[in-house]
Image: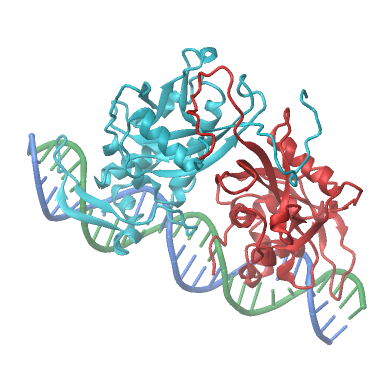
Chain colours: A red, B cyan, C green, D blue
Amino acid sequence: MKDRREQRDIGERAIAHNAVLAVDVVIFTVRESEDPDDRLQVLLVKSEKAVFEGRMALLGVLVQTGETLEQAAGRALRTKTGLDASQWYLEQLGTWAEPERDTRGRVASVAYFALVRSDQLTLVPGSTVLQAEWVPVRHALKMKLAFDHADMLSAAVARLRSKMRYSWVAFQLLPEEFTIPDLRAVYSSILDPSVARLNSSNFKRAFANLFDSGVLVPTGERAGTQGRGRPGDLYRFSGPLAGTWERELPWHNRR
Amino acid sequence: MKDRREQRDIGERAIAHNAVLAVDVVIFTVRESEDPDDRLQVLLVKSEKAVFEGRMALLGVLVQTGETLEQAAGRALRTKTGLDASQWYLEQLGTWAEPERDTRGRVASVAYFALVRSDQLTLVPGSTVLQAEWVPVRHALKMKLAFDHADMLSAAVARLRSKMRYSWVAFQLLPEEFTIPDLRAVYSSILDPSVARLNSSNFKRAFANLFDSGVLVPTGERAGTQGRGRPGDLYRFSGPLAGTWERELPWHNRR
DNA sequence: GCAAAAGTGTTCATCGTACACCCATGG
DNA sequence: CCATGGGTGTACGATGAACACTTTTGC
């Protein structure tokens, strides 16, 4: 309510800056974990703000003058965590700009949604690097996060779940080479255990289109043995992740 | 690349404002039109900016100091067009913030996606009201619009098309009372003519769930006659527009 | 009568999924 | 041996969609 001088609209030659632009990134990955339900994890950092002492926050930066939002998101990943994700899936999630969401003034934060491969998680801690931590999404959703980051996180999780059904983003969460059981684990840990009830043969059948269109090809190799039983064959995905609206996967809604 | 003074991050007590926050609204409605394909229309205004002289633009305002983004969108509708939409469907679409999208400085624009009922289009032109115009979407998509508004528009159209399939937003585009053929016209003009190939009995069957869950009820009245043939029965929709992920409608992808 | 709206029923192909098998491989 | 990965085929139920036919209503 301060600064109430009548704002004139478009048409003004010089306009006063009235907000700070920030970018927050919700970075997901799938990693090994004792509990299979905790495989889906999100990158959180220690909040630097005194008010939120102790709370975790999403990775965020202020947007610099000549920078696009995507560039700012990339900069956050590289310089703040030292993460080396040569390619990642990045997509805008939404903008949070409640007048009072930051006590220091008007901060509009554009949230991004990102997926990184689990084999590109060579976290390189350096001097300027923040304390970054992979937290199982299941836990993160119950945590009190800084600012309105809890809202962003739950929006991101919802987006991930729905994108899993009509696009191939799952492959962006797997290493370059993976087995069918790996793929199955990603779907069952994100969409939910219902997929685990599916017969293994039916699961593979759901990807039949991908196999004969040649975007999902066996490498010929076989995974190293990781327990008893036959090791899985390795596959490689080489296709667009983008969601077409063809019904690409069954198991739309199960409970 | 100018203004490269190292920007310190969150943790700073006072931070300089570095962007102007704007809200642009892509307002859709369905109205009568000679060509049935032109029924879906979008609200455009004469661009006030000299550089874009002659080009049309989306309805937009700058966000005021104490205001939420949704409030700004509502203010744009009311005060700039005099439109009386007592209730409308409003949803955030995305944020455009390319450094050079506005020559006057950094303007981050949050685009909204809105649907108003055709019977609430009592446009009340007043003194402070802009020249607003309903333009068929089919034409608007081919026009050169101001700023990056063409991108926003096509994103909004894509969003509308996909939401039509898994939610009931179609009813937000119809008057309070409507006939089944009206409903059918909305689907066929937005999704595309393919729906018109459907048998009328099959079309109604697609909404069977709505009928026996009682959210789509006949008013008992009958529409005024508008040609030869029997006038359609009137219906009223009283349910949430929100999209659940149940497969709510068939005809997912046709060509 | 004609045309559009509305209602009822049938048929057919497709598809998701359960299930019953089979073999291969490594501990 | 056993557990896991991988492969093949079948059967059943659900459903989207085409089609045929009838009835109602207003010009």
Residue A235 in view (yes/no): no
Image check: A89 left or right of B164? right
Whole-percent x, y for residue B65 in the image:
53, 37
Residue B56 in view (yes/no): yes
Image check: C14 left or right of A220? left
Q: Which of A132 and B148 is in front in this view?
A: A132
Q: Nearer the viewer, residue A166 or A38?
A: A38
Whole-percent x, y for residue B206 in the image:
36, 54
Please state the total of marks drawn on the protein image. Answer: 0
Image check: B244 left or right of A168? left
Q: In which quarter of the image is the C terminus of chain A?
A: bottom right
Residue at x 24%, y 51% (from the top left corner): B235
Q: Which of B161 and A142 is in front in this view?
A: A142
Residue at x 43%, y 27% (from the top left corner): B138
Whole-percent x, y for residue B102 in the image:
60, 22
Q: Nearer the viewer, residue A120 or A253?
A: A120
Quarter holding residue B96: top right
Rendered view: A83 above or below A21? below
Residue extending farthest front: A2
Whole-percent x, y for residue A168 in the image:
67, 50
Rendered view: B125 above or below A159? above
Residue at x 70%, y 69% (from the top left corner): A37
